Amino acid sequence: MAFSKTHTVAVLAALLLGGCAFTDQALFPALAPASDSSSTTAATASSSASAATNSYSLPRVSSGDSTGTFVGQKVTNLRGDLQQLQSTLTDQSNQLQQIRNQTVQDSQNYHGTVAAIAARLQVGTTLGNPILVQQWNEAVSSLDRINDDVLKANRLSTEVASTSGMAAYLLESVRAARSLSGAVDEDHRQLRVLEDETNGTIVLIERLLTDLATDVQRQQQYVATERSNLNTLAVAIKNGQLYGASLANAAYGNPVIGATATQAAPTALTTTERPLVVIRFDRPNIAYEDALYTAVKGALDRRPTAVFDVVAVSPPNTTPGAAALGETTARRNAESVIRSLSQMGLPSDRVRLSALNSPDASNGEVRVFVR
């Protein structure tokens, strides 16, 4: 925390006022340790505290005899402020370890449930199996708890940032005390030691902030990825067969996004061009998702930046009414295919919808082209 010259002079003036005691309460507000909302056991809490001590070993605050001078009294007060700051930091590092332990437990529950669903789907099951639907809901709840752990880490990061500000203020106060008159050599020796100990504490605070930022970023990305995978898993449960991971995991690189994707002139389609997938809707309830997923996943593996054209193809008809009806039906089927791709995790900016008439389409069909 940077301090201006004006602020430093104000601190010095406050120190020079003999009638104003520089107590712990004057430097810091009451710092009660944040309550732990996690349901960890006493053994886990003890283990967490031990791990936190090993990870963030605080410098021991030195003891010293008061010299009886005005500056010596300030040294005593500042030493108490540092001890209070270190106690707060210890509590916060323990909270981080408890959050990490809770996240591990929630992640194990989540992956255990997902693995049970995948095992059932791998051997085949009924469409929309209610047991799998219930397990899927449990997996969603577990992932929500992991997201709650991320929110706890975010809140803790804000608290540690506040602790960092108070540590910087304490350091400035220690340095300001060295400029006071009426001190003996022992006072300045103790102030130099106290400054070194405060600097060491600030280093540990910054380390804790870095660890929190890393944890939050990693877990946020993890939760986002798993939400996409759950959407794909829901499609698999609906169809009673297993798919792979979300298509979003393969669709990386430099996609065409935003306005560029919608405003770019689409490549002209011809009836002779070879499609990636052809889905013929010649009967009700066509089970096309498995073949569609496999084809699109393979295309993304070969070219991660690929864009897909979903084309509603209708046969030519002798009457305008029949032609309009065929085009409407084909477009509705194409929109259904796009929804399936979205549920599989394919980003919406990777898909373009169009329509054409083709004499070789005896019934309405949907053709998917890769670009």
Image: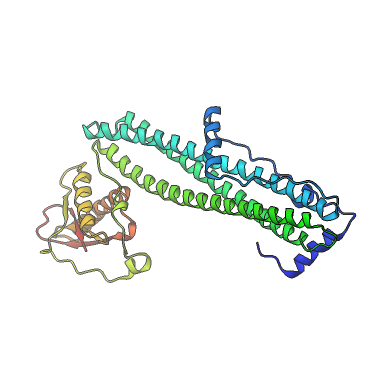
Determine whether 46 is above or below 258 in the image: above
Q: Quadrant of the C terminus?
A: bottom left
Of all residues, the one furthest to the bottom in this rendering is 265
Left or right of 58: which side holds 215? left
Q: Please identify the quarter of the rendering in which residue 256 is found.
A: bottom left
Residue that appears at 37% across and 65% down:
258
Tell me if I can see residue 325 in this picture.
Answer: no
Front residue of this view, candidates 188 and 247: 188
Residue that appears at 83% across and 60% down:
14
**Residue 272: where, in percent of width, then height?**
10, 64
Residue that appears at 53% across and 41% down:
54
Determine whether 349 is above or below 236 in the image: below
Front residue of this view, candidates 304 and 228: 304
**Residue 328: where, in percent of width, then height?**
25, 55
Determine whether 280 is above or below 5 in the image: above
Residue that appears at 78% across and 64% down:
179
**Residue 150: where, in percent of width, then height?**
50, 45
Left or right of 21: which side holds 55? left
Tell me if I can see residue 85 in this picture.
Answer: yes
Of all residues, the one furthest to the right in this rendering is 19
Left or right of 220: which side holds 339? left
How many marks can you see?
Answer: 0
